Amino acid sequence: MTLAISGPATAEQESQKTLRDILAALEGRSNFKLEAGAGAGKTYSLIETLRHILSNRSEYLPRDGQRVACITYTNVARNEIIRRTDSSPHVFAETIHGFLWETISRFRKSLLHEIETLPGFARLLEDQTSLQDYSVSYDLGFRSVDEHTIRLHHDDVPTLAARLFVKPKFRRLVADRFPIVLVDEYQDTPAGLAEALLGERSSFSGESTYGFFGDHWQQIYDKTCGSIDHLPVKPIQKRANWRSSQAVVALLNNMRPELPQATVADSINGTVTVYHTNNWTGPRGTHSKKGQIPDRALKETLHWVSEDARLRHGKEATGPTKILMLTHSSIAAELGFGGIDRSFKRNEDYVRKNDDVVAFLLDFLEPCCEFFSKKQYGPMFDLLKRSRPRLKRRSDKTGWADLFGQINVARSEGSVGDVLDVLLEQEYFALPQEVVGRQRKWELALRDLESGQELTEPRRLVEYGKFRNVGYREVIALREYVEENTPFSTQHGVKGAEYPNVLGVFGGGWTQYNFPEMLAKFPQRDTFADDEKKRFERSRNLFYVACSRARENLVLLFTTELSDGAMRTLIEWVGESNVIDVRYSPEGAPVSA
């Protein structure tokens, strides 16, 4: 089968047509939805729309003080909008929470009335007889009530906004300030919010005109709205792809024929290759890794596939390869910090450094060791400044050298606990109270145990004990990953990014996703009931996001067994010659056919 794109149009031509459709909708004050697949240049269309409005401000923002609102999903996106519109005072660019709080914060009485019935405040308000004199604040992001102020949780803001936006009078008040509201990444807005913004109106007179920019196939987060096809918005498609090679775009088009994309005029051919492990005859995983080849075999297979794909790509391959896996746990097994992963119940504690001890080691100790080894003492003592480093006598210099000698021996040969013990016993700089306190509470908890009894709670102390037993080399490996010095990322973590070459690994590790089943059922996708449709789309969307990150070459590796139906889908998408079955020796090592 030949991977090809039908139709004479180019990405350049499609983008021009899309912009004309958007401007026609704006001129007619029609609410619209721009559906732009991965790589389509959605942000470009959004910026061009904003520039058109600013160039025709008297038409779209006729009254003094009126602004066009641009709602973004992240602060990074907000800052990009501000930069690309030259910080125009006529553009109000803000995150979804920032925009909603701007619109509702001045209506204190209405907020207090609604807060009384919010489930999260039932216990906090049980002793209050009246909220009449309270103010409402959204600054810290968590719920609290003191004698004068009610503070909102992040989730409370869209909930309260939805309750106010259903009122026509409130929507008209918002329209007085923001006649046009553009929503970026609409699929990631909280569920139910788009319905509230538009309201149930028979006439749009006096209300804001909304433009929704996004792609419901890229909805990969929970509690977000996804598709808004059921709402009264004019559908506009952007059938362009400015990112990917012809082969990658052909795959995306075969997956999604209802939104075909045209490549740029001078796009390269590129490649798409699928590898599967159906020939593995050894034991496979269970539970969350049901059907997956063992970790050791996966590591060897991944290395073999990477090399085989590089040879197949030949001159087509330029630049590094990004390896996308489903979970941080899978990456931990590959990079050598699996013990850390098993120590913590929540991977955010070590990946996002939510745990204080992990944060101290990654952001403080490791940089200090790096500075010391390079004899960069100035930056090291700048980092130590808050820890009151001792350097008063000439003998202290020898003491510092001895201390880092001990630390480095423990880092290379010992456990996390060995390193922490060296740090807790030294007197050259103070450790954070969070670290000292965790150690003290852990020691006290162990002291209270009976002989032979194990610590089972609280969770933080149990995890701390496990973490102490992990070899410290895993901390060094974790830092490399967190600092993005490895080729690995999760499939969730690369949304919006792009790379020359991508190797996507699809297997077990998370029971919410079943890629082989999604592929096998793809031909029946229009017949699913609600629950089955939701399961199917969860896997489909993440698969689509991972595949569409590639600019030139894409490799897909399936580590769980594929059914005949799944194989047929893949062959239909990429052609039989591009589907490779990995062969294994009797010892379980991948070998060339």
Image: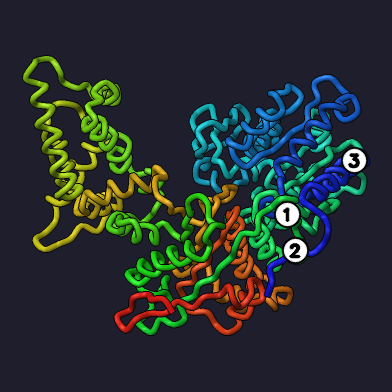
**Label 3 belongs to which residue?**
29
The residue mark sitting in front, 2 or 3, is 2
**Drawn side of residue 282 relative to residue 168, left or right:** left
Residue flagged by tag 2: what amino acid is it? Ile
Q: Position of residue 566 (x, y in %)?
A: 59, 78
Residue that extends furthest to the left in the rendered view of this protein? 395
Compare marks 1 and 3 and give the one earlier in the sequence.
Answer: 3
**Drawn side of residue 559 relative to residue 468, left or right:** right
Q: Secondary structure at mark 2?
A: loop
Q: Position of residue 262 (x, y in %)?
A: 76, 56
Can residue 363 be seen?
A: yes
Instruction: Determine contact: label 2, label 1, CB under 8 Å.
Output: yes
Q: Quadrant of the C terminus?
A: bottom left
Q: Quadrant of the N terminus?
A: bottom right
**Residue at figure coordinates x 77%, y 50% from the top left:** 11
Q: Residues within 10 Å of mark 2 (few under 14, many from 20)?
A: some
Q: Secondary structure at mark 3?
A: loop
Q: Position of residue 300 (x, y in %)?
A: 35, 68
Residue flagged by tag 3: what amino acid is it? Arg
Q: Quadrant of residue 537?
A: bottom right
The residue mark sitting in front, 1 or 3, is 1
- Mark-to-mark CA distance, 1 and 3: 31 Å
Q: Is residue 86 above or below residue 487?
A: above
Q: Residues within 10 Å of mark 3 (few under 14, many from 20)?
A: some
**Label 1 belongs to which residue?**
263
Is the image coloured rainbow, by chain, by secondary structure, or in one colour? rainbow
**Label 2 belongs to which residue?**
5
Compare marks 2 and 1 and give the one earlier in the sequence.
Answer: 2
